[in-house]
Amino acid sequence: MRIRTDDEVYRVDAVWLGPPRATMPFRARYVAWGVGVVVFLLVLTVERRIGISLFWSIAWGIVVTILLTRIICAKISHERPLSAVASMWLRELTAPRETTAGQGGAVSATRVRVSTGRPRKRQTKRGRGRGVRTPKQARA
């Protein structure tokens, strides 16, 4: 015996198929239409600023809009609505970051002092060095 889950309830999307008896050849959720309109206007604005002619900006604008809308709507579901995705994206962009830029300028060895003598071990209070006995200690 199989137990049916309520997944079908969540799989139902608010989909507009088009006018009666003249439906669209594809399924698009209402949120996809809204996202598509906004993306299309942004793409057209960018293309016109670049200087692409009106015909080509509309033609390529439709293609780019479809691609971007599909990418955006792939991240949106009933569990993660558009407002949650947009706020997460905004918070990710404005989050404080650790500064990785170095402090100061180029490194140079011109200010390094060089001595001709080689460094030696320090003398201890009891003798000349570690494990070395003085003549007095050797006699005792």
Image (spheres, helix red, strand yellow):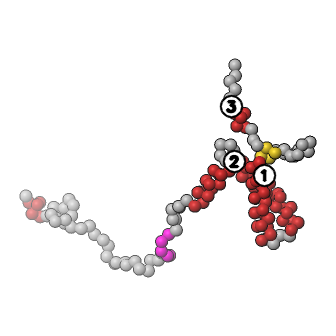
Callout 1 amino acid: Trp
Residue carrying label 3: 6
Callout 2 amino acid: Ile
Q: Position of residue 138 (x, y in %)?
A: 11, 60
Residue carrying label 2: 76
Secondary structure under tag 1 reads helix
Secondary structure under tag 3 reads loop
**Magenta-drawn segment:** 102-106
- The residue mark sitting in front, 2 or 1, is 1
Q: Residue at x 81, y 72 (%)?
A: 51
Choose between 60 and 94: the one closer to the eye. 94
N-terminal of the two: label 2 or label 1? Answer: 1
Q: Residue at x 68, y 24 (%)?
A: 3
Residue carrying label 1: 33
Q: What is the quadrant of residue 128 in the picture?
A: bottom left
Mark 3 Cα within 10 Å, few/some/many (few <14, many 20+)? few
